Amino acid sequence: MKPFHKILFAFFAISFVSFSACNKDDEDSTKNPGVLSVFFDNKLGDQSISIKDYGDKTFDYMDTDGQEYNISLFAYYISAIELEGPDGIKHLDPLNVSANADEVTGYYHVISTTPNSNVINLKDIEAGTYDKIRFTVGVDESGVQEGAAGGVLDPANGAWFWNWNAGYIGFGVEGNASNSGQEYVDWGNGNETLEGTYAIHVGGWKDVEPEPGEDPKFVNNIKIIELDFDSNIRIEDGLNPEAHINVNFEELLKGIDFSTTYAIHRPDLGKPFAEKLVNVFELDHVHQ
Amino acid sequence: MKKRSLWTSPVLYWACFLLLICTSCSDDDEPIDPIDRYEFVVPENFPQPRYTFDNNPVTEEGFELGKELFYDPILSRDGSVSCNNCHIQATAFADSPIHPLSVGVDNRLGIRNAPSLTNMAFFPEFFWDGGVTHLDFVPINAIEAPFEFDETVENVVAKLNAKEKYKRMFRDAFGIEEITLPFALHALSQFTNMMVSANSKYDQYVRNEGASFSVLELEGMEIFQEKCASCHAGELFTDFSYRNNGLDSTFADTGRNQITALESDIGKFRVPSLRNVALTAPYMHNARFSTLKEVLDHYDDGMVHYETIDEIFVAQDGRLGIDLDENDKEAIITFLNTLTDTEFVRDTLFFRN
């Protein structure tokens, strides 16, 4: 923002404050909106993830059941991010679906093949004190039912999308496991599934209340995660606060038996994993 | 989007046009332009559309681009198959009877009969199993299914970007310099959304536009309403539910179950719309029957039991089916013939350029 605008803004802000006696937070109303960088730090237990090639049988991790595994690819959607403060201040990251990639906002695809996709820079946040973050893992009905979308929601641009049971894969991880039951499959046209691999794809967005006595028709695996900050942070123009969130894949894969569970590609099969997402995301720390 | 009846004949068309000029007042603030053939119009007797027109309104340029894509085999891996291969205007954009199951690249055989595309703008879900919930996402399946186009969406976008013709058409339609998938899908939806078929004899009859039904057609309509309309409901002649109508006692293609993963959905398929049904043979998801008579014979005494069979077909004594005598069948078929919209299947708007 240019200095002149700053002065102009300050002038209006001051006039506003002086005319409205009931403003709660005089200090904040004179500050310009700020930013917050949210880091999603992907981990396997307490280690950072080292991405292996698909089919690579060098394992750098062993779980408590003695299964050795690694990760070759992961991706997840973060959307509808909200911040809240102790005084009731609230920020909603604007959410918009459009065919035009430049107009798609509020949907983020953290994907292991795209460097820095794990850092989400939130902008235009009203100046204030914040102590809580809330976000959706996946793309919910409001994102799917607008139809074809660009940017991170474009299947021709790297979006993780299910064609036949249409919707986005909210959380996915693939890798190799010492005891995976996966056999080699040749799908034709150069597509193949390698022996000893695994793929856990969690999707499904539809929330239909069943008729009385009827089974639910669709499994909704969209999860909303709410994390309290370990301390309050100030957000205002000129400050560069950060929130660091651990995304611990060990929590997602805890208790899995790779000999029988190695290809999850359906909403109902993904449900047990979706239920674990609340433990996968945890706040590490925030700092100014 | 305005709600008004379709123009039915050139005479009526001009009469209305003159009326408009003379009265110079209409329901809307904007004057109705009778030569705007690219406006999506909700027929008077239809429900409201389900498509999200707010973010993809139909325009002439978008429609014409969608048409170009629809008829262009560039969407398939080897340039051999277009949407039009399985969706032909003469059969109300269903497949030709010579392809009971869809035929894709390398003459690969699909697993289901390609349904009519008419009135898709009013549909909440798509395909025989309802796995797709927005019209925009439908073509992705045709493009990437190995037994249809066997192509990737990434490659389609690259092929389109390499063609000057498409660069120009996308620029004209959407103001974009680089072609992306969502705009291609929007163009295809614009073309498909305009496939509103609502000018059959039946429509002209229910809208009191001068058509009259014969005794047999009236009798057929009454029997239909009594015995068929609980599923083939409303003006689109479907309630969009998924039901097992007794075709088989085992199911290689499990239908709705492929989407919901529920055992109670094995063997269930969407109740199809019956608009233009006389043109869309063969019938059922697996093209089991070649004629409407065979279909009615099936409902009369051909149904077989499987545990998910729809209870509407099960009589108190356990007998399956719908009681229909030969006269009933003749009358119903006579009525179903009134659902054929000849004007639609000959509409030059949809002709390949």
Image: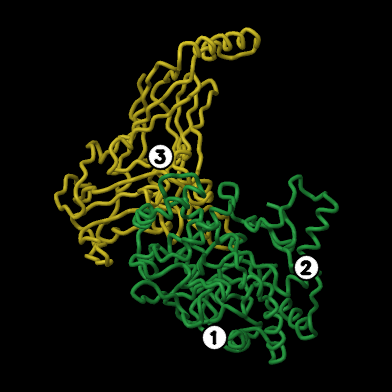
| Comes first in the chain, label 2 or label 1 | 2
Rendering colour (chain A): yellow
> Which residue appears at 46% of the width and 23% of the height?
A130
Q: Quickly name the residue at label 1.
A: B290
Q: Which mark is residue B11?
A: 2
Q: Position of residue A62 (x, y in %)?
A: 19, 47
Q: Where is residue B279 in the image (x, y as percent from the top left)?
A: 59, 79
- Left or right: B254 as drawn, with respect to B7: left
> Which residue appears at 61% of the width and 71% of the height?
B273
> Which image quadrant is residue B190 in?
bottom right
Rendering colour (chain B): green
Chain to which mark 1 belongs: B
Foreground residue, A127 or A210? A127
Whole-angstrom CA distance, mark 1 to mark 3, is 50 Å
Evaluate whether label 1 is on the same chain as label 3.
no
Chain to which mark 2 belongs: B
